[in-house]
Image: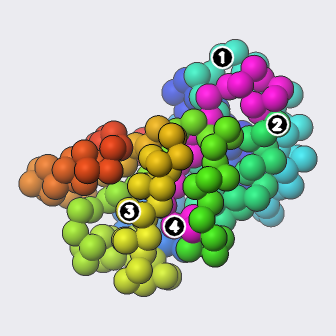
């Protein structure tokens, strides 16, 4: 199974294929790998111990960040990610760690997970997708329904309050320039960084 894989100068961690969204633009609809990875569809979810063992195969000095992001929503396995993140921090000289998430972690886990990220996660990258709640729902098709947009925004605010670096992203081919302006306003209000990312990034 492809648990760890390289993208640009970062080492990515693929721990689950589960996701509560069915985004209209999701890479999984058209490909089974990203960057230099092998096939990212997992045969089964690896244990935290298995993931930690995989790091011995790589030279972490070659990478700027460890990024929890694969072919699923990482917070679906948040408790396991906490174990792996703690291992990385302890073993690799407090290596910077980022999580790429849809921002539904509180809904998925049934609790506020932002405080649990402190000391483990340095950067939280959240897919904002669209500044309008209705259009957002049409894009992401969340199983949680209409509460999803507000929950995502609230999660971003909580992460900022915890002192984490928060980046809200949109995909460059999915919204208008006017909508990007609105996204930037949301980020400014929250205290987050706004990033427009290429579709395949």
Residue 102 falls inside the magenta stretch: yes
- Depth check, front residue: 30 or 136: 136
Q: CA distance from mark 1 to mark 3?
A: 34 Å
Which of the marked residues, 1 or 3, is nearer the chain's N terminus? 1
Q: Which residue carries the number 1 mark? A: 62
Which residues are drawn in magenta?
88-106
Picture disc at residue 74: none
Q: Secondary structure at mark 4?
A: loop
Which of the marked residues, 2 or 4, is nearer the chain's N terminus? 2
Q: Verify CB contact (< 8 Å) between mark 1 and mark 3.
A: no
Which of the marked residues, 1 or 2, is nearer the chain's N terminus? 1
Q: Which residue carries the number 3 mark? A: 153
Dot 3 crowding, Cα within 10 Å, few <14, some 14–19, many 20+: some
Q: Secondary structure at mark 1?
A: helix
Q: Which residue carries the number 2 mark? A: 87
Picture disc at residue 104: 4
Residue 6's place in the image compared with 174, above or below, is: above
Residue 82 falls inside the magenta stretch: no
Which of the marked residues, 3 or 4, is nearer the chain's N terminus? 4
Identify which residue is drawn at 75% across, 49% down. Answer: 82
Q: How is the image coloured?
A: rainbow
Identify which residue is drawn at 27% across, 73% down. Answer: 133
Which of the marked residues, 4 or 1, is nearer the chain's N terminus? 1
> Residue 25: which quarter of the image?
bottom left
The furthest residue to the top: 61
Dot 4 crowding, Cα within 10 Å, few <14, some 14–19, many 20+: many
Q: CA distance from mark 2 to mark 4?
A: 24 Å
Q: CA distance from mark 3 to mark 2?
A: 29 Å
């Amino acid at each position: 199974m492809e648990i760890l894989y390289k993208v640009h100068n970062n080492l990515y961690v693929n721990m689950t294929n589960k996701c509560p969204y069915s985004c209209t633009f999701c890479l999984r609809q058209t490909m089974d790998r990203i960057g230099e990875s092998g096939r990212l569809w997992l045969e089964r979810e690896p244990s935290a111990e298995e993931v930690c063992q995989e790091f011995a195969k790589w030279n972490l000095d070659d990478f700027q960040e460890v990024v929890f992001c694969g072919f699923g929503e990482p917070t679906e396995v948040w408790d396991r990610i906490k174990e792996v993140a703690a291992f990385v921090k302890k073993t690799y000289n407090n290596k910077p760690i980022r999580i790429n998430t849809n921002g539904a972690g509180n809904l998925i886990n049934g609790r506020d997970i932002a405080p649990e990220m402190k000391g483990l996660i340095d950067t939280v990258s959240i897919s904002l997708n669209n500044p309008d709640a209705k259009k957002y729902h049409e894009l992401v098709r969340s199983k949680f329904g209409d509460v999803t947009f507000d929950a995502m925004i609230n999660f971003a605010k909580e992460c900022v309050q915890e002192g984490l670096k928060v980046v809200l992203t949109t995909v460059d081919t999915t919204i208008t320039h006017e909508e990007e302006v609105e996204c930037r306003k949301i980020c400014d209000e929250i205290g987050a960084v706004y990033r427009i990312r290429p579709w395949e990034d």
